[in-house]
Amino acid sequence: MISVYYRVKAGESLSQIARRYGVEEEVLVRLNRLEGVRFLEEGQQLRIPVKEPVRHRPPKPAPAPSPEPGPWLVLLPGETAGEAARRAGISEGFLFWLNGMAPGQKLYPGQRLRIRP
């Protein structure tokens, strides 16, 4: 029989741990000599029988690096031309010029604006 050891966390019950590992509570009681024990203690170590070795979740992959900003920017709701230009790292005038617009021309949320030549 293969066993793993589990360290009890605060507030956990034997029934919760048994359910998590798919084991009968009585098996855990017998295997860990818990007859007469009413509560588990935080940090207590329990031996748990398993049919197959427990496979731990693989570590989360590192987040992908941010892609190079593309040549477009989508205007956010409530965002002004100046705010969009700052977000793109360009001047407001250059934003209007790149998009063939007159300075101060009305922009709309969701509008796609060129931010690179």
Image: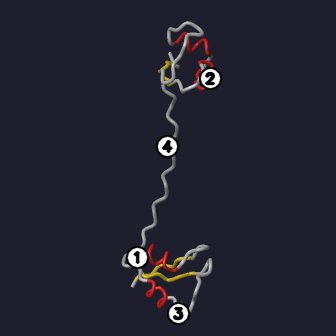
How far apart are labels 3 and 2 at the CA level?
Answer: 68 Å
Instruction: Mark 1 or mark 3: name the one nearer the start of the chain.
Output: 1
Disc 4 target residue: 64
Q: Within 10 angstroms of label 1, few (less than 14), some, or many (20 or more) residues? A: few
Instruction: Mark 4 or mark 3: name the one nearer the start of the chain.
Output: 3
Q: Position of residue 92 (x, y in %)?
A: 61, 15
Disc 2 target residue: 83
- Please tell me which residue lies in front, 61 or 25: 25
Q: What residue type is labelled 1?
A: Gly
How far apart are labels 1 and 3 at the CA level?
Answer: 20 Å
SS at circle 1: loop
Image position of 38 (left or right of 71): right
Residue at position x 47%, y 79% in the image: 4
In the figure, residue 7 lies in which quadrant? bottom right
Instruction: Mark 1 or mark 4: name the one nearer the start of the chain.
Output: 1
Mark 3 or 2, which is nearer the eye?
3
Instruction: Mark 2 or mark 1: name the one nearer the start of the chain.
Output: 1
Disc 3 target residue: 35
Q: Where is residue 39 in the image (x, y as percent from the top left)?
A: 59, 83
Examine the rendered structure and indicate whether residue 46 appears above or below residue 99.
below
